[in-house]
Amino acid sequence: MSPQSSTPRYTVPGLSTKEGGRLIDLLMMRLHSLNDLALTLKHIHWNVTGPHFIAVHEMLDPQTLAVRGMADAAAERISALGGVPHGTAGVLVAERTWHDYSVGRADAIAHLGALDLVYAGIIEDHRKAAAKAASVDPVTEDLLIEHLRSLEQFQWFVRAHLENSAGDLSTADAGSETQAAAKAGPSRAIPAKKTANSGRTAKKAATGKRAR
C-alpha cells in the first residue's frame, strides 16, 4: 500500500508544515527503495557464481555500504523535517510498489543483468523525486541529486560488464529481471525463494525497469 500522508507538528524554517509533509512522504519512498537496494545487493553478493565470482562479489560490498549511507541520510532528513523515518521490514514490504528481487543463485553476469534493471528503476524514481522536491526545498533536492551521482556511477560499473565493444547492452530489450539475467549470462539462475509477498500482484506494470 502507499504511505499515508502526514503533516508534521513542525518542520525546518522557511517551509510550511504542509510542504514538510509532502517532502517527508517523498523521502519515505526513497528510504524504502534504498533499504531494499542494500538488501538486494547483499543477496546478490552471497549468491553469485561462476568465473566472475570474485570480481562481482567484491564490487558489491562498497556499493552496499554507500547505499546504506544514502538511506541514513534520507532518514535523517525526514527527521529534520519533523517526520518519523520508518526503517522496519514490515513497513517497507507494506508500502513498497515492487516485488522482491527475483533471481537466486546464478552466474555473476546473469545477476548483473538483473541488477541493471534494479538500478534503472531506482534512478528513474529518484530523478522524479528530485524534480518534485526542486520546487519546494533545494536542500532535499540536493540530497537526492547527490544520491543520483553515486547510483548512476554504480549502474555504469554494472553495465560495463554487460556492454559489447559496439556499445550495445546485452539486456537492452529485457522486460524483467529474470529475462535480463537470461540474456546476460548462462541459464543457471535459480529463482529466489518465494515469500508471502513475492507472489502478489505488482502495483506498477512490469517493464524493463523496476519502479522503486
Image (tube, rainbow, N blue to C red):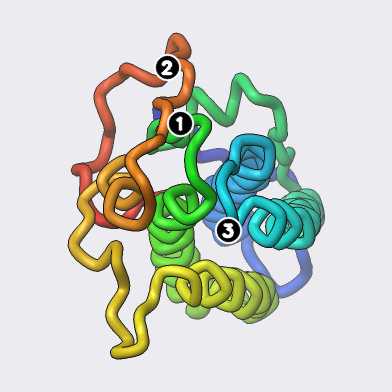
Dot 2 corresponds to which residue?
197
* Mark 2 or mark 3: whose residue is earlier in sequence: 3
Mark 3 Cα shell of 10 Å, populated few (<14), some (14-19), many (≥20)? many
Which of the two residues, 167 or 63, is positioned nearer the viewer here?
Answer: 167
What whole-number distance in Å separates the C-alpha atoms at marks 1 and 2?
8 Å
The amino acid beneath tag 1 is Asp
Spot occupied by residue 95 in the image (x, y as percentages of width and height): 48, 31
Q: Is residue 155 above or below residue 165?
A: above
**Which corner quadrant of the image does residue 168 belong to?**
bottom left
In the rendered image, which quarter contains the N terminus? top left
**Residues tagged 1 and 2 counted as in contact (Cβ below 8 A):** yes
**Does residue 4 appear to the left or right of 121 in the view shown?**
right
What whole-number distance in Å separates the C-alpha atoms at marks 2 and 3?
28 Å
What whole-number distance in Å separates the C-alpha atoms at marks 3 and 1?
26 Å
Dot 3 corresponds to which residue?
23
| Residue 40 appears anywhere in the view | yes
Label 3 or label 1, whichever lies nearer to me, is: 1
| Residue 18 appears anywhere in the view | no
The amino acid beneath tag 2 is Asn
Residue furthest out toward the bottom: 166
* Mark 1 or mark 2: whose residue is earlier in sequence: 1
Residue in view at x 41 percent, y 69 percent: 162
Label 2 or label 3, whichever lies nearer to me, is: 2
The amino acid beneath tag 3 is Leu
